[in-house]
Image: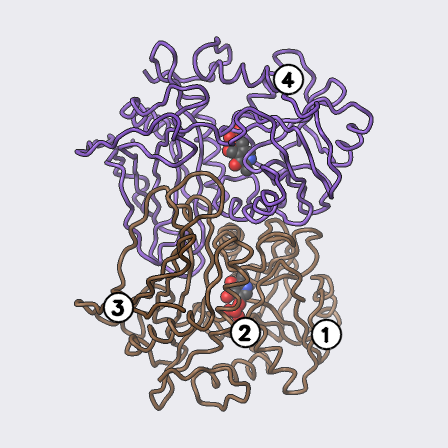
Chain colours: A purple, B brown
Amino acid sequence: MMDEIKIQKTLQPKEKPQLSELGFGNYFTDHMFVMDYKEGRGWHSPRIIPYGPLELDPSVMVVHYGQATFEGLKAYKTKDHHVLLFRPHANMERMNISNERLCIPTLDVEFAVSAIRKLVEMEQDWIPEGENTSLYIRPFVFATDPHLGVRPSHTYSFMVILSPVGSYYPEGIDPVKIYVEDNYVRAVKGGLGYTKTPGNYAASIKAQEVAKERGYTQVLWLDGIEKKYIEEVGTMNVFFKVGGEVITPALEGSILAGITRDTTIKLLKHWGIPVQERRISIDEIYEAHAQGKLEEAFGTGTAAVISPIGELNYQGKIISINDGKTGEIATRIYDTITGIQTGVLEDPFNWTLKIK
Amino acid sequence: MMDEIKIQKTLQPKEKPQLSELGFGNYFTDHMFVMDYKEGRGWHSPRIIPYGPLELDPSVMVVHYGQATFEGLKAYKTKDHHVLLFRPHANMERMNISNERLCIPTLDVEFAVSAIRKLVEMEQDWIPEGENTSLYIRPFVFATDPHLGVRPSHTYSFMVILSPVGSYYPEGIDPVKIYVEDNYVRAVKGGLGYTKTPGNYAASIKAQEVAKERGYTQVLWLDGIEKKYIEEVGTMNVFFKVGGEVITPALEGSILAGITRDTTIKLLKHWGIPVQERRISIDEIYEAHAQGKLEEAFGTGTAAVISPIGELNYQGKIISINDGKTGEIATRIYDTITGIQTGVLEDPFNWTLKIK
Ligand SMILES: Cc1ncc(COP(=O)(O)O)c(C=O)c1O
Ligand SMILES: Cc1ncc(COP(=O)(O)O)c(C=O)c1O
């Protein structure tokens, strides 16, 4: 049995940012959820307290050895002022998968979701109501032992912080240009690629910066072994529509099992549109393009939901997809997912959790 | 030009631990070095202040995206009360290699070494004087922007903390048993393997734990692509003596360029013992053993200096090396390196920096 969540309210509520100033991940709400873990005692002392700095020993293991995991999901306000979470259990189940790989104690999924729920409920005035805005929810766990030497920590903190956000990419729902990376590697089978852990993102920064300098928004990773098979894009999974069929890389251990990816696959199946999860080589995509069969490409992820891909650059060979315009399927999926998330459309799959 | 290092002394010096209680990385000295980086301003405000907790925003980028690097080196006290650092410039040059890969601003090597020097000088009473003890020095840099969203941070901290240490392994200089890992992968070419960054260690914890449960001290990593070529051991590079010749894996981007590895190679060459850096398959080592030609195996690293390998387990096939005893070469290298480090032996290579 988990303890009850203790609540300590802030005495200094912050001013809320203007919608136009939001950006992504720059502002944080008034409160945060915290819970501690100690070997022998388990997870304990769940509490909601004023948002404020952590006091960490300079030897804190997370900073030196990166033993940590995180998640990302969103809360939306409906037109009639209800608050919806989108598939929060899926996030917390995935966090446990990450935790197991990182030797971090797992969480009680129900309890973690109830903590998120409670916190978002308290902070509901922070959920922005403009087009393409939402409240981004960041649960994270990190190793807190003050110790140098590689081993699993004996203590951890689980926290949830909230950030009112606008679009993740400046492009919004407009197509992005993607650089196909065949030099740097993000992850490989047998490693941490399927988890949400800091090291995967540290590994991605350099390639992302090089791509940016070349005028590209993001990087499309190829597999680390043959540098041939398509993996994922930055913080998105990737889909292609080729000759009427939708394809996406299979989950083989090196990419994240995106929840938006799963949502997309379920919607496509529901609509009777053929969709396949399998290995896709970059050559196959370029060939499909040469034959006029590459109809659409898009990324899927919580931050941007759907991000159409208008251009690919692989070894200097540039192809334009769907004339650089957002495709029909991408639009339909985007409208459907965001419609369900914001309560505008019905939710036949029971994906939303109404928390108010 | 760097600013001068400001010094603020502690008013509450701690009690020093007993030699027998040291272990590794459990105690920290009274002071630490800190310096900040801000885009546009560069590295600034170098200071030595009382050792104490960091105040970090819960969204601090290092915790979420692992943009950080670190180093590890040691200070020793000589019999006549001088204080020696071992190859500190090599560490800070390597940190810059890591920083470049992680998109972290590089440091002025001379200045960083002078900061370490100053701090160690202040804390010289903390350098333990027992057998196999030293003062472990941990320089580290980490991303400090309070921001969610993957990009390089605009602000960083560089810090140095000090820990009086005993043996890294409970075995001390006695041979360790090593498990050859052919399931989990630590790093792959094109990734971060050659850097000292938290994510590499996060990636290693699980395999290390599984090996421990099986009664092994550490894991020997194989390459992530063919799972065939030997890489390194936990926090050590690895050497084998086969038929009179010493071999060690070449630096191909997936392993750390260990300073103890480099020191070992230079000593072997100096002694006229043949040494080769090249690809070594695990099968080659097992074959050499079958032919009676595998004479020694040992790991090299700052923490343990030299750690003889007495047993390997690869897919359940167990081989004992040199009857599980410390070999001649391992002993000679250990005695020579520690002799130079502690000022007992002459230092023809100019590896030590006398700071007092
Ligand atoms: C590496 C990576 N791939 C894919 C995704 C998409 O996953 P989801 O749809 O669950 O947000 C994300 C973002 O969460 C990610 O970080
Ligand atoms: C992964 C890894 N390999 C090798 C080494 C050995 O390097 P060095 O001899 O510089 O300590 C270390 C330790 O620093 C390490 O962490």
Residue B192 versus residue B312 in the image, above or below: above
Residue B214 horizontal/vertical position (percent): 52, 55
In which quadrant of the rendered view does residue A110 lie?
Answer: top left
Q: Which residue is mark 3?
A: B30
In front of the other: A142 or B122? B122
Between marks 2 and 3, how big is the CA–CA gap?
A: 28 Å
The C terminus of chain A - image quarter: top left
Rendered image: mark on residue A329: 4
Of circles 4 and 2, the one toward us is: 4
Q: Which residue is mark 2?
A: B260
Q: Chain of mark 3?
A: B
Tell whether circle 2 marks a residue whose Cβ is less than 8 angstroms from ligand 2. yes
Badge 2 marks a residue whose secondary structure is: helix
Dot 2 or dot 1: first in sequence order is 2
Of circles 2 and 3, the one toward us is: 3
Q: Chain of mark 1?
A: B
Residue B132 versus residue A56 in the image, above or below: below
Task: Look at label 4 and name its amino acid.
Answer: Ile
Residue A227 horizontal/vertical position (percent): 71, 45
The N terminus of chain A - image quarter: top left
Same chain letter for marks 1 and 4:
no
Which residue is rendered at x = 38% and y = 11% of the image?
A79
Same chain letter for marks 2 and 1:
yes
Which class describes the residues within 10 Å of circle 2: few (<14), some (14-19), or many (20+)?
Answer: many
Between marks 3 and 1, how big is the CA–CA gap?
A: 52 Å
Q: Which residue is mark 1?
A: B292
Which class describes the residues within 10 Å of circle 4: few (<14), some (14-19), or many (20+)?
Answer: some
Which class describes the residues within 10 Å of circle 3: few (<14), some (14-19), or many (20+)?
Answer: many
Same chain letter for marks 3 and 1:
yes
Badge 4 marks a residue whose secondary structure is: helix
Q: Is residue A272 left or right of residue A47?
A: right
Q: Is residue B282 left or right of residue A339?
A: right
